[in-house]
Amino acid sequence: MTNLESQPLDSVEAPVEERAPAERATTPPASAATAARRRGTGPLFWLAGASALGLLLLMLAGWWFRPPELHGVLIQSPREAQDFTLMTSTGEPMSLSDFRGRYVLLYFGYTYCPDVCPTTLNDLANMVKALGDKRAENVQVILVSVDPERDTPEHLAAYLPAFHADFLGMTGTVEQIQAVASQFGIYFEHHEADEQGNYMVDHTSAVTVIDPDGQVRMVFPYGVTGADMAADLTYLMRRG
């Protein structure tokens, strides 16, 4: 028998076991809702955005309607002004009710007044200018004379355009003027005339604001500037 040479055990290669390639780890695709949340466009995002927008609108509304620092005296419980009829600087009688739908600024004074009346009328003219053409269309300034003996319709018509072309004058008898003035808390008294027939008239110098519904809404004391009156009127117009 022929002897076979034995081979060392460590020289014999073990058969290699073939393995299947490892499966690649995969993540299941995210749902549309999950992806939306990741991008910040999900329901919570839209809810937060709507809440922020609502808050912004409330802030803007609060700013628009916020009570400003008023310069006139606001009437907390408005009352309806009693209607009256007087002769006007146009030569025709007119009533307070003829101006419904507009803001009426009623001032009691007289054309021979040396200082207070022209100052107030000048402030009222500046107020109309500050309001601008659009808002001024809804405003009527009326001077009711507390000196009807000298302030005839013709004299008022010659006097008022020096301040503003749209200012209207009203006059009548002393008794008529007293009846109208009393309902607005206006006092006036004539002084004795001098040798030349000149005299002064003491009177309350205030501007009464009557709204488009005929309600007394505000009173401007003497000295309120035209710009400040315009600011207060704008506030009333916004409130309605």
Image (cartoon, rainbow, N blue to C red):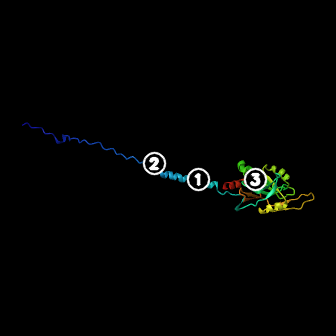
> Which residue type carries mark 3?
Gln
Secondary structure beneath dot 3 equals strand
Q: Earlier in the sequence, mark 1 or mark 3?
A: 1
Q: Are marks 1 and 2 in contact (CB under 8 Å)?
A: no
Q: Residues within 10 Å of mark 3 (few under 14, many from 20)?
A: some
Inter-mark Cα distance, 1 to 2? 27 Å
> Circle 3 is placed at which residue position?
140
Relative horizontal placement of residue 123, taking residue 19 as reference (left or right): right
Farthest left residue?
Answer: 1
> Which residue type carries mark 2?
Ala
The label on residue 57 is 1
Q: Nearer the viewer, mark 1 or mark 3?
A: 3
Q: Quadrant of residue 239?
A: bottom right
Q: Earlier in the sequence, mark 3 or mark 2?
A: 2
Q: Earlier in the sequence, mark 1 or mark 2?
A: 2
Inter-mark Cα distance, 3 to 2? 60 Å
> Circle 2 is placed at which residue position?
36
Q: Nearer the viewer, residue 12 or 145?
A: 145
Q: Are marks 3 and 2 in contact (CB under 8 Å)?
A: no
Q: Quadrant of residue 204?
A: bottom right
Can you give x and y, in whole percent of width and height, for residue 136 in the image? 73, 50
At horizontal 48% and vertical 51% (from top left) the residue drawn is 43
